Amino acid sequence: MRGGIAERGGIRVGHRIIEINGQSVVATPHEKIIQILTEAVSEVHIKTMPASTYRLLTGQEQPVFL
């Protein structure tokens, strides 16, 4: 949501969630991530990174050198 709390916290369209409450969710199916988030009882701490960086770090993409 434009101007929402996530955007104010630095999360942008295209970011990948890589960690929830200190637990890696890199190889976790999308449905499981949704379940973790919807079942959260109190504060949720999320780490994200841009999708392009995620693809490079996970070997899904190779860097292009000019």
Image (cartoon, rainbow, N blue to C red):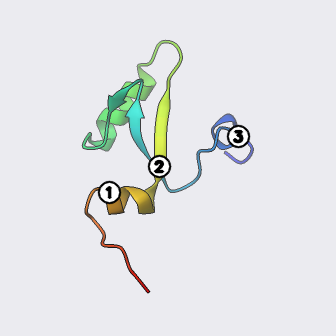
The percent coordinates of residue 58 (x first, y second) are 27, 56
User: What residue sits 31% from the left and 37% below the top?
Assistant: 25
Foreground tag (2 vs 3): 2
Point out the tag, 1 or 2, that comes first from the N-terminus: 2
Q: Please state the total of marks drawn on the protein image.
A: 3
Q: Is residue 4 left or right of residue 23?
A: right
Q: Residue 57, which numbered label?
A: 1
Separation of residues labelled 1 and 2 (CA atoms): 10 Å
Query: For the residue marked with disc 2, what is the amino acid?
Result: Met
Q: Residue 49, which numbered label?
A: 2
> Which residue is label 3 attached to?
8
Point out the tag, 3 or 1, that comes first from the N-terminus: 3
Of all residues, the one furthest to the front in this rendering is: 66
Q: Are marks 3 and 1 in contact (CB under 8 Å)?
A: no
Helix, strand or loop at disc 1?
helix
66 vs 44: above or below = below
User: What residue sits 33% from the left and 42% below the top?
Assistant: 30
Question: As rendered, which of 49 and 37 lies closer to the eye?
Answer: 49
Point out the tag, 2 or 3, that comes first from the N-terminus: 3
